[in-house]
Image (spheres, rainbow, N blue to C red):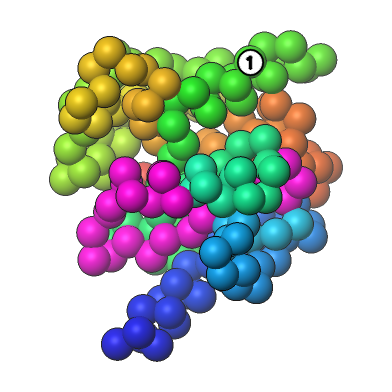
Amino acid sequence: MVNRARGKGTVAESAVVEYLRTHGWPYAERRALNGSQDKGDVSGCIGLAIEVKYANAGIRMGTWIKETNIERLNARADHGILVMKPIGLGERQVASWFAAMVNSDFNRLWAKVLVAPEFSVVVVNDPPDHYNIKDLKWQMTAKLRTLEDPSREILALTFRPPGTKDNPDAWYRVLTLEQMVRLLHAAGYGDASYAEAQVSDLQVLG
């Protein structure tokens, strides 16, 4: 059972690495295990700690985000990003997998976009919603369809986990991997010259 789970994790990590290699991080690769000093699943992405989860059995956002933040500290990275493969979206739809971070980390990333030489994206912010993982895929699908200018707009859903009403820094921000990559480029991470010349059409989540 452990080997099977590890195999699924390897598949997910490989899909994310391949996507990153063709979208601005040509030296991305799977990272060897580091035991208690885990620095994330992907190396070769300067300034970023990236954790990848094969989440077909269910998404445990809170536990996984905490793990990602520990890895960010271990790696002395600027930002920690949790990438999750949800049920129903295979490796060919990796661009539509979920990419999440805590709100405090997201705000620090967005601050870098605001002072970037080329201010090329805007974030679409909805009011914070109660966290319900069962609705996440539906909400992402529906709200992506409402974007007026997909080439410029970044959709970042905001979720408020239980017990965090008065602590917005601990809220979750969830994007698709494609949109997270665009946001990272806008903040100066990765090499946009390796990315595709045209912004791809947003995939419709199945």
Q: Is residue 50 left or right of residue 75?
A: left
| Quadrant of res 109 | top right
Give the residue furthest to the front: 36
* Vertical order, 75 against 124 (above or below): below
To which residue does mark 1 refer? 111
Residue 193 placement (x, y as % from top left): 83, 42
60 drawn magenta? yes
30 drawn magenta? no
| Quadrant of res 136 | top left
Judge by depth and name the residue closer to the eye, 50 or 120: 50
Q: Secondary structure at mark 1?
A: helix
| Quadrant of res 102 | top left
Task: Give the crowd class for mark 1: few <14, some 14-19, many >=20 residues within 10 Å.
Answer: few
Judge by depth and name the residue closer to the eye, 178 or 61: 61
Can I make out residue 206 in this image? Answer: no
Residue in view at x 51 percent, y 43 percent: 69
Q: Is residue 157 left or right of residue 163?
A: right
Judge by depth and name the residue closer to the eye, 55 or 74: 74
Residue 1 placement (x, y as % from top left): 29, 87
Residue 99 placement (x, y as % from top left): 46, 44
Residue in view at x 36 percent, y 79 percent: 5
Q: Which residues are magenta?
A: 45-67
